[in-house]
Every structure is written in structure tokens, then in C-alpha cells.
Amino acid sequence: MKAVLTRVSSASVTVDGETVGSIEAPETGGLLALVGVARDDEADADAKAETMARKIAELRILDGEVSVEDAGAPILLVSQFTLYGRTAKGRRPSWSDAAPGEVAEPIINKVASLLRGRGLTVEEGRFGAMMRVSSVNEGPFTVLVEV
């Protein structure tokens, strides 16, 4: 499982012109979390979802080295199978390392549920949809998390 976490003051996701998820955090900052699930994550799905949720909530990456949990900052969680695109050969990425939707969707849902269980505000994209993601990055500050 991989995530690209970007510190943002605002972020949103639209599908077919409709905003399906949006966060605003001009004071504290929030996180745009692009999360991808690998084919082999199915074996340890619960443990990996728990570790990813903990990392998203507890990494001290907001301004002043505080975590999302410390600041009570919002999260926009967007599924992103393309994080597992292999580009070593040729000009067309291979998606064979990405989990199929029926495997990935429940794991993404589990991460969102675990974050909400910590009392955090979590907005989401729409799994499997063609999404338009907009963000105002702060810093800019972006990290890659792998579990």
C-alpha cells in the first residue's frame, strides 16, 4: 500500500461536474491523501489499512510539525491505483501491480473508516470514477508513505 500525502489549505474532488469531496483548512492545513492498494495487499489487508490510517493520522507533517490528529485537520482521501504503475519498460505504464477494484475498494474504505474512528474529518473521492482533483498545496510539502 502506498500513499502520497500533500499538505494543503484546500482540496476538492469533482465527478461529472459534481463536487463529491472537499476540505478547507487555511489555518492549520489539511492533507490530500492519494492512496493506492497493491495486488499483494489483500493478504494483510486489515494490518496494512491500520498502519496506513495510523501514518496518515500521526505523521507530524503539518505546519509546526504537528499531525493531522493533533491539529484536528481534515483529510481528503482519494483512491489512486496509478501509484502502482510500472514504467521501467516501454512508454506505456503497466498496472499489473495494482489491486483490482474488488480488492482495493474495501481496503480504501477501511482506511477511511479507521481515520473517522479517530474522530477525524475525512472526505473522499468516488472509487473507480474519473475524478478531477484540485488542491492548493502548502509549502509545498509532499511525502510518500509505503506500508
Image (cartoon, rainbow, N blue to C red):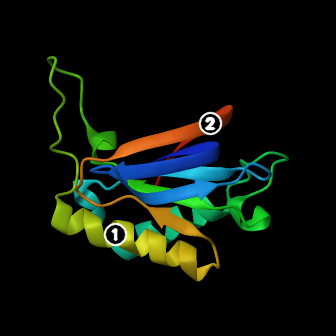
Residue 90 position in % (x across, y down)? 14, 17
Rendered position, 88 above or below 21: above
| Tag 2–tag 1 contact (CB < 8 Å) | no
23 up-or-down from 142: above or below = below
Residue at 28% x, 53% y: name it: 38
Q: Residue at x 57, y 59 (%)?
A: 75
For badge 2, the amino acid type reads Asn
Q: Quadrant of residue 122?
A: bottom right
Residue at coordinates 27% horizontally, 67% vertically from top-left? Answer: 105
- Name the residue beneath numbered marker 2: 137
Q: Position of residue 135 (x, y in %)?
A: 54, 40
Residue picked out by circle 1: 107
Which mark's residue is nearer the viewer, 2 or 1?
A: 2
Locate residue 33 relative to residue 107 in the image: left or right: right
Say how many tags the image has.
Answer: 2
Mark 1 Cα shell of 10 Å, populated few (<14), some (14-19), many (≥20): many
**Which quarter shows the N terminus?**
bottom left
Tell me where residue 94 sits by quadrant: top left
* Residue found at the very far bottom of the displayed protein: 117
Measure the alpha-carbon separation of dots 2 and 1: 26 Å
Amino acid type, label 1: Ile
**In front: 130, or 78?**
130
Q: Is residue 93 rendered to the left or right of residue 15?
A: left
Q: Nearer the viewer, residue 80 or 54?
A: 80
**Can the viewer see residue 61 in this picture?**
yes
> Dot 1: what SS?
helix
